[in-house]
Image (cartoon, grey):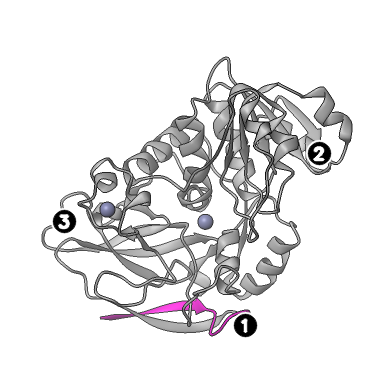
């Protein structure tokens, strides 16, 4: 075992504080990673606040991890000491089910092992990236291409893949009109990636406050959803709408913005159930769908794509003693567009 410095929530809604956690010894197929940067994802806050229920404490959040390999197990073949690597939202899965075998480990029938707030396959608690180092099986480690700085790469491990996977699955590309609801941590990556894929991109945001940013990040159009004229003007426009917000939406209103056969895909999850008049799907053969992060192979594909196109997250780098302040600011939508912790300050 090794002792890692960490920031942890001791109980639900309690401020995070400096502590230590034990990491398992480096096994035959394990990689020990010196963490350099960890992104702050909105879901870190949901879980630290026990907003979804079932949270385990103490909790070391963090599933947007970038660092450097410090030690490898005897049978590791994919990585060597000094490699630049990342870890995303999960660190293991059953490896045998039909989804694992297809590279869709995020949909493992046994459930994947979450990077934090979970138990590993030996029943030990998992602790995330707000920490000095982590030990992960090599099959669940990603390679960060040289063209990407580690600090702006960290948020790609959740925000990047969460948006890349549905954009690819629903064929965002040349000739396709894609709308992104919400310009936050997920939304700003969705805009960058959809633009790089060649789609015509529209941001649908509550106000025009971030319009300049949205256009700079690659959007072709920017509309305020607080303006009812937006919904008249854009009726029947989009092939794909990606919702990155966790607030409950007027789904009927947004479905009306789709073309026939269009899809409205949710990657943000409201805490409350929603209601929907199914006529908004039937007329126009429309799809209302969801999508969860991405598998390991697709996450690597996303990192390679982002490096090729020069896409990193827009970040605000903070020291660890500002994590609690950062949480308040994320909840107030006061971040452009991702806080990243310099883990050397933990
Ligand atoms: Zn996340
Ligand atoms: Zn599986």
The x, y position of residue 95, in whole percent, is 22, 53
Residue on which the image places disc 1: 14
Residue on which the image places disc 2: 225
Give the magenta-colored segment's residue range. Answer: 1-14
Residue drawn at x 70%, y 41% is: 251
Dot 2: few (<14), some (14–19), or many (≥20) neighbours within 10 Å? some
Label disc, if present, on residue 76 of the rendered structure: 3
**Lower position in the chain sequence, tag 2 or tag 1:** 1
**Lower position in the chain sequence, tag 3 or tag 1:** 1
In magenta stretch: residue 2: yes
Element under disc 1: loop
The x, y position of residue 111, in whole percent, is 34, 59
Q: Nearer the viewer, mark 3 or mark 1?
A: 1
Tell which of 59 and 303 is nearer to you: 59
In the rendered image of this protein, does residue 94 appear above or below residue 217? below
Task: Give how far apart the Cα atoms at labels 2 and 1 are.
Answer: 35 Å
């Amino acid at each position: 075992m090794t002792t890692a410095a960490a920031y942890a929530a001791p109980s639900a809604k309690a401020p995070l504080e400096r502590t230590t956690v034990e990491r398992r010894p480096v096994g035959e197929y394990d990689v020990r990673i010196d963490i350099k940067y960890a992104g702050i994802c909105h879901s870190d806050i949901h879980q630290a606040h026990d907003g979804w229920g079932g949270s385990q404490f103490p909790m070391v959040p963090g599933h947007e991890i970038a660092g450097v390999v410090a030690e490898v197990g005897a049978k590791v073949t994919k990585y060597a000491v000094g490699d630049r690597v990342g870890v995303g939202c999960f660190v293991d899965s059953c490896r045998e089910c039909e989804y694992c075998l297809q590279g869709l480990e995020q949909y493992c029938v046994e459930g994947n092992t979450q990077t934090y707030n979970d138990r590993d396959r030996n029943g030990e608690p998992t602790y995330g990236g707000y920490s000095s180092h982590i030990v992960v099986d090599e099959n669940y480690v990603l390679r960060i291409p040289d063209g990407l700085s580690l600090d702006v790469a960290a948020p790609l491990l959740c925000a990047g893949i969460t948006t890349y996977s549905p954009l690819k699955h629903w064929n965002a590309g040349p000739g396709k009109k894609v709308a992104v609801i919400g310009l936050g941590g997920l939304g700003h990556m969705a805009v960058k990636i959809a633009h790089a894929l060649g789609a015509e991109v529209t941001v649908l945001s509550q106000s025009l406050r971030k319009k300049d940013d949205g256009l700079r990040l690659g959007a072709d159009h920017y509309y305020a959803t607080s303006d009812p004229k937006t919904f008249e003007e854009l009726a029947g426009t989009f092939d794909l709408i990606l919702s990155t917000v966790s607030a409950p939406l007027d789904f009927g209103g947004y479905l009306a913005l789709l073309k026939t056969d269009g899809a409205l895909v949710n990657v943000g999850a409201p805490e409350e159930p929603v209601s929907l008049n199914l006529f908004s799907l039937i007329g126009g053969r429309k799809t209302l769908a969801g999508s969860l992060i991405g598998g390991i192979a697709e996450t690597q594909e996303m990192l390679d794509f982002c490096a090729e196109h020069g896409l990193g997250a827009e970040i605000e780098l903070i020291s660890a003693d500002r994590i609690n302040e950062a949480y308040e600011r994320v909840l107030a939508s006061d971040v452009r567009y991702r806080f990243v912790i310099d883990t050397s300050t933990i």
